[in-house]
Amino acid sequence: MRLDELHWVRRVPWSLDANWKVAIENYLECYHCSTAHPGLAKLFDVRPDAYELHEHERFSFQVGPPREGRPPGSFIDAGEIPRAQWHWAWPNLTVNVEPGAQNLSIDAWFPAGPHRTEGVTDYFFGADVPEALAEEVMAFSRQVGEEDALLVASVQRGLASAMVPEVNPTTTMRPSKATQRREPSKTSPPTGSKTTSAPRPFVASLTASTKFSSL
Ligand SMILES: [Fe+2]
């Protein structure tokens, strides 16, 4: 990654029909990728024993290796960056690096009401990256984003159904006994890898006292 060679190319605004915590939670894992993102799953190895999820108290990041046998000629083989990096910094900033040519994008996620999130993505590319290649990377990002928008809107509808126990956003939350209990999952990371344990129930952990929590 050569940050000093990157140039800003475009800012893309977007919106989601979901609470910002629901939207961010979706960003934090790729267990849903094999079914929700068929295009991404063709290019990246999203199996739990290959895909990395590193969890820390105030940030996390994911490392997505290109898939063996992927379709040839895509943007991920058009440069020296070997694998994807998807970073989250608490509470509402994410930074993405795709494999291939020099690139980086930054997402800012803003609460816009209990059921709405507004955001912008700024795309940066190396000066020598052809325009068509940059467009291909941004189109990939847009496709994944549109698939995630449908997912989080669905989750939001589920939360609004009154079938989910209410979480009080005005107090410092700790996961309830119910949310602490976790069934063994086929998608849990393998023991012994650098990958951390399966994701925590993030909506609860994000509702710690903060101005954002009122949204
Ligand atoms: Fe996703």
Image (cartoon, rainbow, N blue to C red):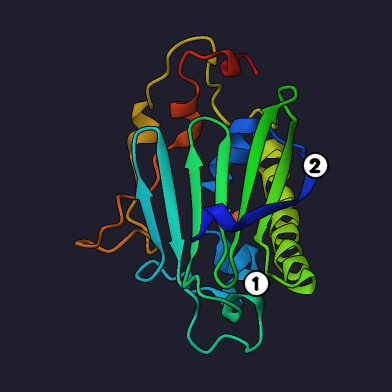
Secondary structure of the residue carrying tag 1 is: helix
Between 106 and 127, the residue placed more toward the observer is 127
Locate residue 178, reporting x and y percent. 38, 32
Q: Is residue 42 visible?
A: yes
Q: Residues within 10 Å of mark 1 (few under 14, many from 20)?
A: few
Front: mark 2 or 1: 2
Q: Residue at x 49, y 61 (%)?
A: 1
In the picture, residue 201 is in which quadrant?
top left
Locate residue 33, reporting x and y percent. 57, 63
Q: Which mark is residue 38?
A: 1
Locate residue 87, reporting x and y percent. 49, 48
Horizontal side of residue 46 vs 185, given as left or right: right
Q: Quadrant of the C terminus?
A: top right
Q: Compared to 40, does 27 lie above or below?
A: above
Write down the residue under mark 2: 13
Horizontal side of residue 173 vs 39, given as left or right: left
Q: Compared to 133, does 13 lie above or below?
A: above
Q: Residue at x 46, y 35 (%)?
A: 202
Query: Which amino acid, mark 2?
Result: Pro
Outermost residue on the top side: it is 170
Among numbered discs 2 and 1, the one appearing first in the sequence: 2
Q: Residue at x 50, y 80 (%)?
A: 67
